[in-house]
Image: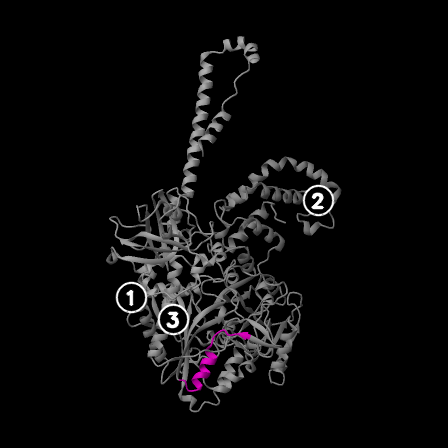
Amino acid sequence: MSSESETLSSSASAPPPPSQSEESSHEDDSKSVSKKAAKKEAAKLEKLRRRQEAAAALSNATSSLSVEEDPLAANYGDVPLVELQSKAPADVNSWTEVGKLNEAMKDQHVLVRGRAQTIRSVSKNMAFVVVREHGFTVQCVITATPDVVSRQMVKFVSGLNRESIVDVEGIVSVPKDPIKGATQPVEVQVRKLYCVSKALPTLPIIVEDAARSEIEIEKALQAGEQLVRVNQDTRLNNRVIDIRTPANQGIFRIQSQVGTVFRQFLLSENFFEIHTPKLIAGSSEGGASVFRLDYKGQPACLAQSPQLHKQMAICGDFGRVFEIGPVFRAEDSFTHRHLCEFTGLDVEMEIKNHYFEVMDIVDRLFVAMFDSLNQNCEKELEAVGRQYPFEPLKYLRKTLRLTFEEGVQMLKDAGVEVDPLGDLNTETERKLGKLVLEKYGTEFYILHRYPLAVRPFYTMPCYDNPAYSNSFDVFIRGEEIISGAQRVHVPELLAERAQGCGIDVKTISTYIDSFRTKPNLRKRTQYQTRAQTLLFGSSMAGGKARKDKPKPNAAAHAPYQGGISFHKSKGQHILKNPMLVDSIVQKSGIKTTDTILEIGPGTGNLTKKLLEAGKMVIAVELDPRMVLELHRRFQGTPLSNRLKVIQGDVLKTELPYFDICVANIPYQISSPLTFKLLNHQPSFRCAIIMFQREFAMRLVAQPGDKLYCRLTVNTQLLSRVSHLLKVGRNNFRPPPKVDSSVVRIEPRKPRIEVKQKEWDGFLRICFNRKNKTLGSIFRQKSVINLLEKNYKTVQALKLPGQSSTMEETGDHIDFSKLGEANEDLRGETSEFKAKVLAVLKEGDFEEKRSSKLTLQEFLYLLSLFNKAGIHFS
């Protein structure tokens, strides 16, 4: 600003001089102004003048700085686009990776490229930038130095946006104190810095926040500090930034190493890699859901697994093959183990004599993987551990092997109830993993000889026990990571097994036919193993991970031979395990003269066994498709004359006479069906029914059990209930989301006589808060009011000369006298509560709880109340 402008500015800011007329008119007033006020006004003017001078000086400094040419401007700035268009080849060896910077490189000149993770300006002469590349970070120092680094360069660096890509050229130095904010133990004294790609000024998430562990956040909260927590939906919506965290970088690199070791090991064992189709005509497994689609007017599926084509490759004399490729599963669950798409590591090989040859390969393969990760991915494992802390894996040089029966016995010894012919659920697998660690000191082991019913249709049965199979699972820390087995190579047995698992044989005819054209096939069998690589953690695609709501009329179904679909919404879960069917029939105690009622026969798997055991089967089925299937299945057989099928809703159907009921029912009708059967006349001998496990456990609960409830007492009033066996969800097709149990219900003979409405009202009050004392429950105002109302009504009906019960005198009561009687009873209100509590004290029930009372105690307490004239209906 020129001196002339300063003068003008000062003149403009000063007040104008007063005129003579003003002086004369205000002469007297000016004399009255005190000296103190004059000094105050002068101070204000001086303060204003100083502010204007300071602003002018700042403006001059800024102007001179903006126009001043920086002689070191070539050492920093934004790289022009033309320089990024591959003008000329360059020597990439001149670049140094951030992860390789160490103390041995002290005083060396380096050139690095990475993202500006954090920028911190200390002063006009110094700034710090933490540069990140592939999860590794180094602190770069920019210090204003004459003829080396200018203040303008410091200012440029301070104005960089986070996550911008920069090229840094400088000298490596080793600081006296360890660096806490970077992975590398050195600093780079910056000489040149260029911004290659500028990021947005404001990003949706910060990498440091996304890389923070839950432990850090919790510790900060305890210390009164608030740290940013990046939620899952935010991570998925900004996945491209989230995968820049050190942990995610490490996860992907570990995954790459797993694939590399997998491929190299198998190549060294004379395997070779193949690539199989992912769009196929039919489902490749019987136990998992599939993605179905229309392919030019024909039904098709995304491959659940490549094993069918891998086995065809073995039939083509390939000997040993493997594949690393995508696998698709239409899973209903949303866990880290149930993914709709994942990368499968699949192997197929011939065996000479025994499927243990396969387990030997698996043993050596995984030990090689673990060793390689520990040796080559130490930094990556450390990066993952900082955000997701974990303990090093414990494994043996020779992997532990247990039979399925041995595993079940270990669980039983630990007090865990397990179906010996069912699959292990997630909770049970984890429990077994803990038991194995305690006993054998390893978190990696193999469990083999699984029950045949829980394995896919192409699994070979054991030679000594057809209930088990030549199959195995591999576990790490109680979670299955591999499934393998010897395969069935006999076409007839394959077709039979496929039908039993509900697979349309026509859709896999090419696969089955491949075994008919293979010479000397009986001498050569196969196995397949699948390792699910679950290192991604979440989808690479942007957007929130959400669970799509099913369409209102879209039936969840699974295929069955003949084109029948099973509808989960209707409770159609067909029992497919033949050993389990035999066990249910055996435990039913069916006599050859029995008429058997079956509810929900489905396709007739259980029906066939019941017809063979009893005299006649009456099957009640709602679905007309299943009715037709039953007729088709038994038509023309000797059993058809002993089968009667009733189409309709069992709850609305008048049931005929039967001796015993055996049923796998839709779980949504469990309660009404149970009491319909118990009230059926004439009474039957017993019912063997499959229920949802929690419902079954309520039926058999005892006083003091967590599940002991009103349903328990009501059922045990009318019958004796016992638990027969637990049934895993994988014994059904399609598998339900819960486990099941089979219970035996025997109606009481003779029945305990009790008025049903009175009993029901009594139990509703007792179990309203089952863990409270009865004294507390019956002191509630609402309960007292209800009982008092009933009491007054009953007392009013006991008029002189009339009977004592409503049922006996209902036709002879003079209702005109009820009002008069109620007037006489008004004085009893204050005494009624004491009357109720007196009943509880008489039977010593005041401090007892409903959750611990037996059936006999409930009956006794009700009789005491009724004796005192207190009723519940």
Q: Where, by quadrant of the figure, is residue 42 drawn?
A: top left
- Left or right: residue 597 compared with residue 730: right
Q: Which residue is mark 2?
A: 801
Task: Identify the magenta region.
Answer: 301-318
Residue 313 magenta: yes
Q: Which residue is mark 3?
A: 259
Q: Position of residue 198 (x, y in %)?
A: 44, 54
- Left or right: residue 463 compared with residue 495: left
Query: In which quadrant will I find the N terminus?
Result: top left
* Residue at horizontal 40 percent and vertical 88 percent from the top: 523
Nearest-to-viewer mark from 1 and 2: 1
The answer to which of marks 1 and 3 sits earlier in the sequence is 3
Q: Tell me whether circle 3 and circle 2 mark residues in contact (CB < 8 Å).
A: no
Q: Tell me whether circle 1 and circle 3 mark residues in contact (CB < 8 Å).
A: no
Q: Tell me the amino acid under the disc marked 2.
A: Gly
The residue carrying pointer 1 sits among few (fewer than 14), some (14 to 19) or many (20 or more) residues within 10 Å by Cα, namely: few
Q: From what the image shows, is residue 266 above or below residue 712?
A: below
The residue carrying pointer 2 sits among few (fewer than 14), some (14 to 19) or many (20 or more) residues within 10 Å by Cα, namely: few
For the residue labelled by badge 1, is the local secondary structure a helix, a strand or a loop? helix
Q: Which residue is mark 1?
A: 375
